[in-house]
Image (tube, rainbow, N blue to C red):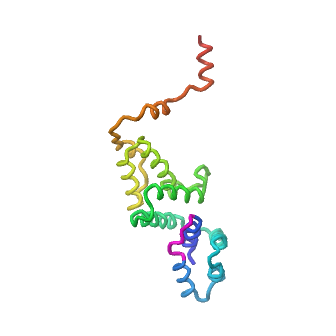
Amino acid sequence: MRREDAFYYMYLLLLGFSDGYDEWLESYLKTDEPMSDLVIDLYFCGSDVEKTISLLHNYCIEQEFDKSVVSDKFRLFFKDAYYSGRMNKGEVVSTMYKLVSDIGDPGDWNFDYDLWGDMYYFDEYYSMAEEGIISWESFDFAFHSYLDNGTPIDSELIWRKNTVSEPLPFSMVKAMIKKQSLFEKIKEFLKR
């Protein structure tokens, strides 16, 4: 059994999806000669998702595997979910964010931004497009480029291609203006 597949299905189940899991396990039940203990244990888990996730987790931590394969499998999963209409854009980006947050903390030194960073930041860019900070055209270009080809987000391009035609609301501009810190206020007071 490939660890890349085990890791993929483990996180897919954690997210509440079972797309292809039964078929994947069934293929091992038919072809695994002799049948491994893991395949037997997974079979006897039945519908106990927590036990299945635990078994897959223990299997995955036994040795290293190619996580870039898993990252690409998830990209293709999200691509299929979006283009088939099972998930809308907002659901895709929020599920990507949850996935990456479950996989690791982007603040950790060993977090692999090359593999997971784009999925993590799409949620933030989606929020910026909703608020009118960046244009939907810019977001859509990055979103579809990533889903279709795995093209990493070019944050400079998102800002450069920004074609927001209406001015930002005053409340948004006001919130973006840097507020004076207490230290700066005291410093200014002492100068008088």
Q: In this view, does 23 lie above or below 9?
A: below
Quarter holding residue 44? bottom right
In magenta, the rendered stretch is 15-21
- Whole-percent x, y for residue 68 in the image: 51, 64
Q: Is residue 169 above or below residue 84?
A: above
Rendered-image quadrant of the C terminus: top right
Q: Is residue 40 left or right of residue 66?
A: right
User: For this rendering, which residue is in front, 85 or 164?
Assistant: 85
- Give the total of numbered labels: 0
What residue lies at 46% left-to-right and 63% top-to-bottom?
78
Q: Does the magenta stretch include residue 60?
A: no
Rendered-image quadrant of the N terminus: bottom right
What residue lies at 41% left-to-right and 34% top-to-bottom?
169
- Whole-percent x, y for residue 52 in the image: 64, 73
Q: Does the magenta stretch include residue 19?
A: yes
Quarter holding residue 181? top right
Residue 35, visible in the rendered structure:
yes
- Whole-percent x, y for residue 170 in the image: 43, 31
